Amino acid sequence: MSSVEISPRATIQKYLGLVRFSHTIFALPFAILTAIIAWQKEVAFRWQDLLGIILCMVFARSAAMAFNRYADRNIDAKNPRTAGRHIPAGELNARGVLMFTVLSSILFVLSTLVFLPNKWPLILSSPVLAFLLGYSYVKRFSMFAHYWLAAALMLSPIATWIALTGSLDWSPVALAAVIFFWVGGFDIIYACQDAEYDRDVGLHSIPSRLGIPGALRFAAISHLFCVAALVLFWKVTGLNTIFLVGVVIVAGLLFYEHWLVKPDDLSRAGVAFFHINALISIGLLLFGIADLWLGL
């Protein structure tokens, strides 16, 4: 009787797939943009700070995503759309995923030591981690789980600014508002795919509560606030014309995202979720860098 040996590389690939490592691009560009603004206006650049930002973002997100897959493993197994995920499909076991969550959490806390002598990242690491992991249970009692996720991601510019400067400023707060309304809106769109299932099993979401047409309108309003927050960020940060052009382009991309997804046709919700939103996050970073460096 032969057994199939799984290589360490294959195992690593499975865990990267579990946490959707590529989706780190949703929040990391905002942390980097915040850091660049802080380095331009508040503090001197240090390579160790850049390394700390990247490590903290990767490990915090990996812990949160892995824990979400662990907490939702039984729910995912009953949903045809998610039954193929790693734990329900038997590709990874629940104990291993939980241990991965613990390891990622420890590495996140240790990564905050990079910012010493600034102790605030270490002090805040545990409450931040608790908030990130707590998201996995919100849909069991509130339809606003989308905005818990949004609040988790919006911590990236705030935490970056505190890690670099030891203080807070309106620039990262305004950028956090952008992320809050942007992520909340696109997560509502994505959740429309599970509206019927969530309703049947007693899970809470805006699509299951308001229906898909109402949810899409709610998401559109959220994205209008996102654009308004972008304008506010442009103003309080003192950015110039180049970034304002980026704001206009982002507004167009958000409009296109809503044009793609119809109440009676959610087949392109995945495209709207990943491709367009990846363009938005990376695009804002590039427009911000160009504006800061060229000053136009």
Image (cartoon, rainbow, N blue to C red):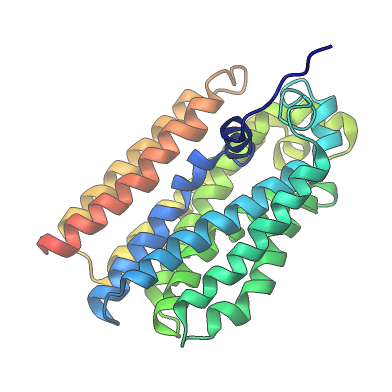
Q: Residue at 55% of width from left, 26% of height from top?
A: 269
Q: Where is residue 168 in the image (x, y as percent from the top left)?
A: 45, 81
* Residue 132 placement, left or right of 76: left
- Is 291 located above or below residue 272 in the figure? below
Residue toward you, 250 or 25: 25
Residue toward you, 98 or 220: 98
From the image, which quarter does the N terminus lie in? top right
From the image, which quarter does the C terminus lie in? bottom left
Q: Position of residue 130 (x, y in %)?
A: 72, 66
Q: Can residue 103 be seen by looking at this rendering?
A: yes
* Residue 63 placement, left or right of 112: right
Q: Residue furthest right?
A: 201
- Is 181 located above or below residue 41 in the figure? above
Q: Position of residue 150 (x, y in %)?
A: 59, 54
Q: How many marks?
A: 0
Q: Residue at 52% of width from left, 77% of height from top?
A: 113
Q: Can residue 144 be seen by looking at this rendering?
A: no
Q: Position of residue 100 (x, y in %)?
A: 70, 50
Q: Residue furthest top?
A: 1
* Residue 12 placement, left or right of 70: left
- Is 105 located above or below residue 190 in the figure? below
Residue toward you, 64 or 134: 64
* Residue 261 placement, left or right of 76: left
| Picture quadrant of residue 7 | top right
- Is 137 located above or below residue 158 in the figure? above
| Picture quadrant of residue 263 | top right
Q: Residue at 71% of width from left, 42% of height from top?
A: 206
